[in-house]
Amino acid sequence: MRIAVCIKQVPETKSVKMDPETRTVIRQGVQSIINPLDLYAVEAALELKERYGAQVTAVSMGPPQAVSALKEAVAMGIDEAVLVSDRAFAGSDTWATSHILAGALKKLGAFDLILCGERATDGDTGQVGPETAAALDLPVITYVNHIHELRDGILKVSRLVEGGTEKLSMRLPGVLTVVKEIGEPRLPTFRGKLKAKGLEIPTFTLETLQLDKNRIGLKGSPTRVVKIFQPEIVRSCEMLPAETEEQTVKAVDSMLAFLEDKAV
């Protein structure tokens, strides 16, 4: 069984800043970490590896420094890793990113299962997992919170929906995006750190993947960030006099009318 885990290196949440000129996330000089929600996908892959036996590959698209995120994944127990990096990929939106990731996954060969985190904390779209599945023409189940069993090539899972859960089955190969409830991510081990330290991680470039330049980067991105601004937060407080019982009722009615008018 072959499993791929797509991970992303993101700025630490408290360090996220946007460039008002390019309208992209500032990554230079900012401490970066593995997208926290991708760690749950790593954990799900490792649990499947322990239960059924599997070769697990981590794939990350990003700048050269994203190698550190891949090495952390290897230290947790991932078998091998690949970095997808090229200046031509810069500025890719989720659609272009998914096209690039799909190209990398195809280059690596057939996978039985591809795992992704629910979303990335820097973009917060939740689109890359499903769009990568679409690019690979694979079925996808999102918001998976429990993997029940794998039998005869059919994976049975539960997914979170509003007000409860759904139980679904999917014939592999396929794609899952997972949520926090899937399991607590393990820590890197000493042996894993030693393996990661000496591991040479290959880099897939545009030349490696032979992708259409019109479908990557800014040119291949159908969506654009057109404006970035800091929202103005206005807080006001209005005192409603209520010295008597009748005044209290009127004050409450006034407050409810205000909330209804603001559609709260």
Image (spheres, rainbow, N blue to C red):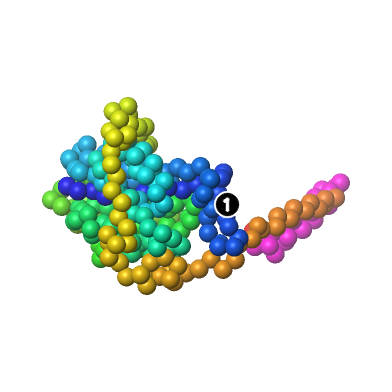
Q: Position of residue 22 (x, y in %)?
A: 55, 62
Residue closer to the observer: 94 or 174: 94
| Residue under the image location 46 percent in, 48 percent down | 10
The image shows residue 86, relative to residue 31, as above or below, that is below
Which residue is label 1 attached to? 17
Q: Is residue 60 left or right of residue 18?
A: left
| Residue under the image location 22 percent in, 54 percent down | 108
Secondary structure of residue under mark 1 = loop
Residues shaded magenta: 242-263
Q: Is residue 14 magenta?
A: no
| Residue under the image location 81 percent in, 53 percent down | 238
The image shows residue 117, relative to residue 183, as above or below, that is below
Q: Position of residue 89 (x, y in %)?
A: 40, 61
Classed neighbour count for the residue bearing mark 1: other residues with Cα under 10 Å, few (<14), some (14–19), many (≥20)? some
Q: Is residue 126 left or right of residue 99?
A: right
Q: Position of residue 37 (x, y in %)?
A: 42, 46
Quadrant assignment, res 250: bottom right
Q: Position of residue 67 (x, y in %)?
A: 37, 44
| Residue under the image location 23 percent in, 48 percent down | 3
Quadrant assignment, res 181: top left
Q: Name the magenta segment's main secondary structure.
A: helix
Q: Is residue 241 left or right of residue 62?
A: right
Numbered-mark total: 1
Asked whether residue 255 appears in the rendered view, the answer is yes
Q: Is residue 262 magenta?
A: yes
Q: Amino acid at mark 1?
A: Lys
Residue closer to the observer: 156 or 86: 86
